[in-house]
Amino acid sequence: MRVMRAALITIGIIQILFGATLLVRPATLQTLLHLQPAAPAWVNYILAMSAARIIGYGVGMFVAAGAPWRHRVWINTMIAIQAVDFIATAAYLANGVLPLGHVAAGVVLPWLWIAVLGWARRRAPTAPPRISPPESSSPTRHL
């Protein structure tokens, strides 16, 4: 469970930092990835809307880290998001739109998170721990 929590917190931090960067300085993404030609200004609107969702998912990773078995939906959807990220990255690489040197993290990180979260999820309990009711202090037994 320690690996799962560490992975969820790490993913949460990355999501929040990436989302905050897109929200506050959306043109940074274009610069970091050396994207040419320059995107029209309205693209920043799409990035800002996406940033809010990315930050929200980062917060969700922290929630899931607190009780992973109870918040499996966050974990499962993050695995799905990472799969979509990889497929999209692979498609844009195959089309020649993006050079591998600029998006290498988009190839490696999704597989890393899928592997770590998938492995940790399989090891995690699928149900909350059972708490036994307290023994009755009454001298009579209830049937």
Image (cartoon, rainbow, N blue to C red):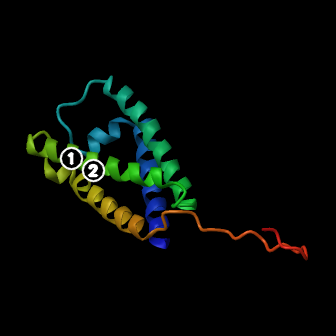
Compared across the picture, whether 43 is left or right of 70 comes to: left
Residue beneath the point at 29% across and 58% down: 109
What secondary structure is found at the residue carrying circle 1? helix
Q: Are marks 1 and 2 in contact (CB under 8 Å)?
A: yes
What percent of the width, then of the height, locates residue 74? 46, 50
Compared across the picture, whether 12 is left or right of 47 comes to: right
What percent of the width, then of the height, locates residue 4? 45, 66
Q: Residues within 10 Å of mark 1 (few under 14, many from 20)?
A: some
Q: Which residue is mark 1?
A: 87
State the quadrant of the C terminus: bottom right
What secondary structure is found at the residue carrying circle 2? helix
Mark 1 and mark 2: Cα distance apart in space? 6 Å
Quadrant assignment, res 134? bottom right
Q: Is residue 27 above or below residue 94?
A: above
Amino acid carrying mark 2 in the image: Ala
What percent of the width, then of the height, locates residue 45? 38, 26
Residue beneath the point at 15% across and 43% down: 91
Residue beneath the point at 80% across and 74% down: 135
Quadrant assignment, res 122? bottom left
Q: Nearer the viewer, residue 140 or 9?
A: 140
Q: Is residue 18 above or below residue 137?
A: above
Quadrant assignment, res 48? top left
Q: Which residue is mark 2?
A: 83
Labelled disc at residue 14: none
Compared across the picture, whether 93 is left or right of 137 comes to: left
